[in-house]
Structure formats: C-alpha cells, structure tokens
Amino acid sequence: MNILIVDDHPLTCHGLTGLLSAIHPTSRVHSANTVAQARAVMDGPTRLDWLFLDINLPDDPQREFVRHVWDSPWAGKTILISADTPVELLRAALGAGVRGFISKAADPDQIVTCFSAVRAGEVFVPEHLSRLLNGSPDGDIRSLSPRLRKVQVCLLRGASNKLIARELGLSEYTVKEYVSSLLAYHRVKNRLDLVLKLQGGS
C-alpha cells in the first residue's frame, strides 16, 4: 500500500507518517510539503492507494489543487486533514466523493479509526462535524458533484462500468473509482444495495 501525505508542516507529515507506518508496517508512506512536490509524486510511476490532503496549503490559496483532486478519481482515495474546516467546504468535498476528514487535533485512535473505516469502504467524518453537516440549512450532506450524479444515474439504469465509461467518455478505471465513491458515500456494499436504497427513498 502506497500513501501520500500532503501538508506544509513537516511535523504533521512526520507524525502521520510514523503512525501510519506503525499500524501498516508493509506500507510505503510518501510526503509532500508543496503542491509541486505532491504533483510530482501523483504523476510519477508509483501508484498511490491513499492521499491525506491538507486543504489549507500556502501555495494553493484559492484551493485550485485541492479542487482538482476533488474533481477527479483521486477524490475516492482522499482523506482531508485540517486544523479548521468550514462546514460548506467539507460538504462540497464529501459531495465530490472525498472519503473522510480528520482534524489535526485528532488523537491517534481517531486517525486509526478513520483510516480503518475508509479502507473498509465507509465515509468517515467526526461525530461533531456530522451533526453540523446534517443540521445545516441544506439538510442532507449527500449533495453529489455533477460527475458523480451522472455516474449514479447510469448505475440506477443498471449500466455496466464499460457502458458508463463509453457514455461519459471516461476510462473504466475512472468509472470504477467513481462507483466506489458512490457506494461509500451512500454507505452500501454493492450496486444492488445502492439501487434498493435510492429507489426505496431510504
């Protein structure tokens, strides 16, 4: 398993690297302190399994890189890390398919719980933030991005990954990542459960 941590604070990278290496000793944990360093690793030969991404990078003041990650298959591999995250920003990230969020103030047990949850196919948000998200004027946090909505419509028609890829002009690998994000987002295990849940209105 290959993991990339993107954070401008070396201490955060070092601490998270140590924790992840301890609980997954066979993994390779990479770190990047700038957007340029992150892009170099992400565009390199190493196939990354998970991305821990700080949403407040000094060299990404408009969050262009962060939003690029959200609007791509990387979203389904991403766990956000931040000291302070506006609720609306977190909702947008989850709607794009991001798999979780942990605060920089979180204790090691919560980080382990978060990573275990997302690796099991779930979406992880700390309880206090989940309450804020669900208690907001917009109600449900499941406001999907336009691209995920298109994939979801195709899934509800029973389309295969190959057919979805052809219809939306995507690779089958990209479709697979989007489907995984949708299953995790709706907290279901497979396509059938997703169809039953959405058509049943639950």
Image (cartoon, helix red, strand yellow):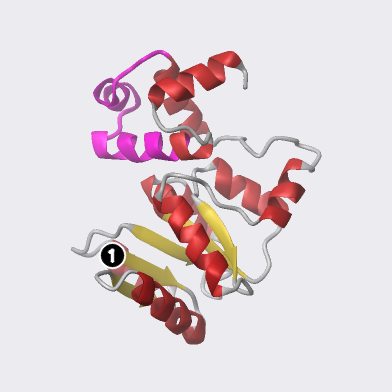
State the residue position of label 1. 2
**Residue at left 41%, top 71%?**
5
* x then y, percent, for residue 119: 40, 52
Q: In this view, does 183 lie to the left or right of 57?
A: left
Q: Give the range drawn in magenta.
A: 157-182
Q: Can residue 54 be seen in this view?
A: no
Taking 176 as reference, is 129 above or below it? Answer: below
Q: Is residue 125 visible?
A: yes
Check if residue 113 falls in the magenta segment: no
Check if residue 162 falls in the magenta segment: yes
Q: In this view, does 106 lie to the left or right of 183?
A: right
- Dominant SS type (magenta): helix
Q: What residue type is labelled 1?
A: Asn
Taking 201 as reference, is 14 above or below it? Answer: below
**Residue at left 33%, top 34%?**
175
* x then y, percent, for residue 3: 34, 66
Report helix, strand or loop for mark 1: strand
Which image quarter: residue 101?
Answer: bottom right
* x then y, percent, for residue 158: 36, 15
Which quadrant, please, contains the N terminus? Answer: bottom left
**Residue at left 36%, top 77%?**
22
* Front residue of this view, candidates 71 and 62: 71
